[in-house]
Amino acid sequence: MPEIEMLKISVEEFSRVQRYMRLSDKNSEAYAEMKERYIELKVILTASGINLTELDRIKE
């Protein structure tokens, strides 16, 4: 898979995870699982040079 396609998928998933997190109770197990994926995606995107300033709505 080309790198640009992988980045596109990661950005889309990052946005999706944030939407789900905003709809969930912060004290739930589901939120905790989503937060782990949120952090993983944030690391991947940052390491790839993606500026998350506009994309990161959770900011945790």
Image: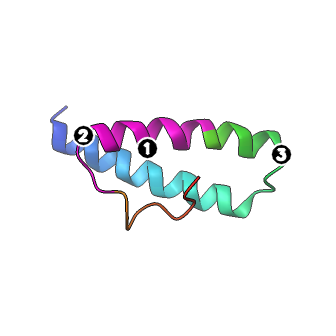
Asked whether, in this view, residue 58 is left or right of residue 5, the answer is right
- For label 2, the SS is loop
Q: Position of residue 40 (x, y in %)?
A: 48, 35
Disc 3 to disc 1, C-alpha distance:
21 Å
Q: Secondary structure at mark 1?
A: helix
Q: Which residue is mark 2?
A: 48
Q: Is residue 33 above or below residue 16?
A: above
Q: Position of residue 21 (x, y in %)?
A: 66, 55
When the figure is inspected, residue 41 is found, relative to residue 53, above or below; the finding is: above
What residue lies at 73% left-to-right and 46% top-to-bottom?
Answer: 31
Q: In screen coordinates, is 14 left or right of 52?
A: right
Which residue position is annotated with label 1?
Answer: 42
Q: Residue at x 46, y 51 (%)?
A: 14
Q: CA distance from mark 1 to mark 2?
A: 10 Å
- Numbered badge on residue 60: none
Q: Residue at the spot x=46%, y=60% of the render?
A: 56
Q: Give the residue furthest to the top.
A: 1
Q: Nearer the viewer, mark 2 or mark 3?
A: 2
Q: Residues within 10 Å of mark 2 (few under 14, many from 20)?
A: few
Majority SS type along the magenta span: helix
Q: Amino acid at mark 2?
A: Ser
Q: CB atoms at circles 2 and 3 under 8 Å apart?
A: no
Q: Is residue 52 magenta?
A: no
Q: Which residues are magenta?
A: 36-51
Q: Nearer the viewer, residue 9 or 27?
A: 27
| Residue at the extreme right | 27
Mark toward the start of the polypeptide (2 vs 3): 3
The residue at 80%/39% (across/down) is: 29
Q: Which residue is mark 3?
A: 28
